[in-house]
Image (cartoon, grey):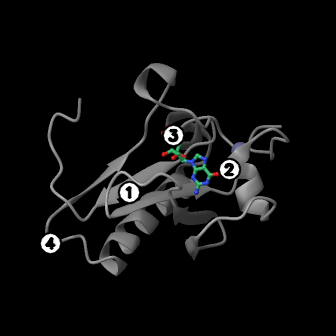
Amino acid sequence: MAGEPQADCLFCKIVTGDIPATVVRETETTVAFRDINPQAPTHVLVIPKVHYPDAASLAAAEPVITADLLREAGQIALDEKITDHGYRIVFNTGAGAGQTVFHAHAHLLGGRGLQWPPG
Ligand code: 5GP
Ligand code: ZN
């Protein structure tokens, strides 16, 4: 069924605690944890507890949870004090755009200068 945990999904296992992660915030619908290979001083992944392969399919099925995800990213940016210099919220979608984990997730990146376009 849509949204159900997937046995072979790394981020579903982080949601259940079967794989450890450095969790920075958790809500009823979301978990946020530090990226294992950080690309900036702050690099946090915000994920829904439900499993959808990417942000667009999450938004189509669960608009309220998608808003939770964005609100959490904004709150973590405040907590990490990265709002003054600006930060980025990225949803890589598809292997060609660098997506490697097919459980929807927002990258929250900040704490350094960020180039645009990102390349
Ligand atoms: P994607 O490339 O799919 O947009 O992002 C996946 C992210 O997950 C990558 O930035 C990668 O470093 C991170 N990642 C992969 N495996 C793990 C893990 O086991 N723990 C944590 N905390 N992050 C992971
Ligand atoms: Zn999953």
Q: Amino acid at mark 2?
A: Phe
Label 2 beta carbon less than 8 Å to ligand 2: yes
Determine which residue is flagged by label 3.
Answer: 55
Q: Residue at x 60, y 37 (%)?
A: 101
Contact (Cβ within 8 Å) of mark 4 with mark 1: no
Q: Residue at x 77, y 65 (%)?
A: 17
Determine which residue is flagged by label 1.
Answer: 108
User: For the image shown, how many numbered marks are present on the structure?
Assistant: 4
Determine which residue is flagged by label 2.
Answer: 11
Q: Amino acid at mark 3?
A: Ala
Image side of residue 60 versus residue 51, left or right: left
Determine which residue is flagged by label 4.
Answer: 84
Residue 14 at x, y = what percent?
A: 71, 58
Mark 2 vs mark 4, CA separation in Å: 30 Å
Image quadrant containing the C terminus: top left
Residue 93 at x, y = what percent?
A: 47, 30
